[in-house]
């Protein structure tokens, strides 16, 4: 038996049948993961990983998709990417954490620093526009 993405094909087929039978219809994915986890005896996190492997497999294997998903590959929305400001803040938090701050303190300090930078930046811009 095949092991697409390290999962047993039987596990993918069982989840595909659950989905095509309306198992996730009108529900948040996390709720569907919990329900399938209860039925299958797997952890919800494992079901989530299996779902995303199935989504990838369904885009790549048309025969499998036609047979088990009624020809409809599972679509997955792309995750939101961090903005430059958020990346900058995360870097500052990591830097403070490396210096021995707790994550909580580093987050608070980094957030305050970022707000100060934004305020200074906006004040500088408004001064240059009026002057």
Image (cartoon, rainbow, N blue to C red):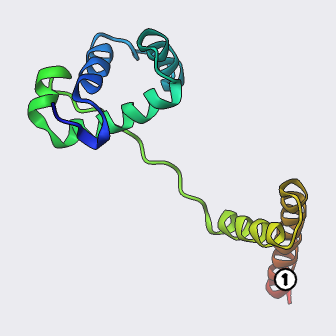
x, y percent for residue 37: 47, 17
Q: Which residue is mark 1?
A: 124
As drawn, 46 above or below 87: above
Q: Is residue 113 left or right of residue 72?
A: right
As drawn, 6 above or below 37: below
x, y percent for residue 7: 30, 34
Q: Is residue 76 left or right of residue 120?
A: left
Badge 1 density bin: few <14, some 14–19, many ≥20, Cα 10 Å: few
Q: Quadrant of residue 39?
A: top left
Instruction: Check disc 1 and report its element: helix, strand or loop.
Output: helix
Viewport quadrant of the N terminus: top left
Viewport quadrant of the C terminus: bottom right
x, y percent for residue 45: 52, 31
Residue sitting nearer the eye, 81 or 43: 43
Residue found at x 89% / y 71%:
116
Residue sitting nearer the eye, 32 or 71: 32
Q: Quadrant of residue 97?
A: bottom right
Q: Seen from this angle, which residue lies furthest front? A: 1
As drawn, 112 above or below 14: below
Residue found at x 81% / y 78%:
121
As drawn, 131 above or below 57: below
Q: Quadrant of residue 53?
A: top left
x, y percent for residue 18: 32, 14
Q: Is residue 17 left or right of residue 1?
A: right
């Amino acid at each position: 038996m095949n092991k697409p993405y390290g999962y047993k094909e039987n596990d993918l087929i069982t989840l595909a049948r659950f989905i095509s039978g309306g198992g996730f219809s009108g529900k948040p994915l996390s709720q569907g993961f919990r329900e399938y986890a209860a039925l299958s005896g797997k952890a919800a996190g494992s079901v989530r990983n299996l779902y995303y492997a199935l989504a990838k497999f369904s885009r790549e294997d048309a025969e499998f998709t036609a047979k088990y998903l009624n020809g409809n590959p599972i679509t997955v929305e792309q995750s939101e990417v961090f903005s430059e400001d958020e990346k900058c803040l995360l870097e500052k938090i990591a830097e403070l954490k490396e210096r021995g701050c707790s994550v909580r303190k580093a987050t608070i300090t980094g957030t305050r620093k970022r707000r100060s930078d934004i305020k200074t930046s906006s004040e500088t811009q408004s001064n240059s526009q009026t002057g």
